[in-house]
Amino acid sequence: MRSHFDEYSQKGMGFLKQVAGHLGTPDDIAYADRLTTAVFATPRELITPEESLHMISGLPMYMKAHYVNGWKNSWR
């Protein structure tokens, strides 16, 4: 079975470059990364874990990674 890690990584970096470009800071990928993670953290705090899983089910893998980054679920 082939690993898709490199593909997801490249697509994720492309996404962050687009975000950085839209922010007017095309050379600051780290800022785009922090902002994207913060934007995804907001709904996580407002909706149930089940709603979160439903929401991210339609996202590409590289966006799912940002959504779950730092997620401490309370459903265990």
Image (spheres, grey):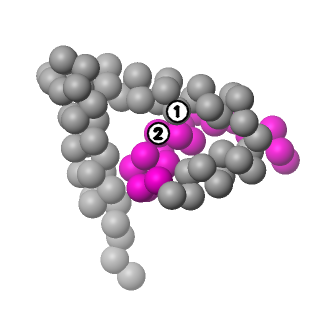
Left or right of 68: which side holds 17?
left
Residue closer to the observer: 22 or 33 = 22
Residue 60 among magenta residues: yes
| Residue beneath the point at 22% across and 35% down | 18
Residue 33 among magenta residues: no
Task: Name the residue beneath numbered marker 1.
Answer: 40
Label 2 with label 1: CB-CB less than 8 Å: yes
Q: Quadrant of residue 74?
A: top right
Q: Residue furthest right?
A: 76
| Residue beneath the point at 19% across and 18% down | 25
Q: Nearer the viewer, mark 2 or mark 1?
A: 1
Residue 40, compared with residue 75, is above or below; it is above
Residue 36, compared with residue 6, is above or below; it is above
Residue 59 on image: x %, y %? 47, 53
Left or right of 20: which side holds 45?
right
Residue closer to the observer: 8 or 40 = 40
Circle number at residue 66: 2
Q: Residue furthest left?
A: 27
Please count the marks in the image.
Answer: 2
Measure the C-alpha gap from mark 2 to mark 1.
7 Å
Quadrant for the N terminus, please: bottom left
Residue 51 on image: x %, y %? 71, 47
Q: Which element is circle 1 on? A: helix
Q: Which element is circle 2 on? A: helix
Q: Amino acid at mark 2?
A: His
First to last magenta residue range: 59-76
Circle number at residue 53: none
Q: Amino acid at mark 1?
A: Phe
Q: Residues within 10 Å of mark 1 (few under 14, many from 20)?
A: some
| Residue beneath the point at 57% across and 29% down | 41
Left or right of 25: which side holds 58?
right
| Residue beneath the point at 39% across and 50% down | 62
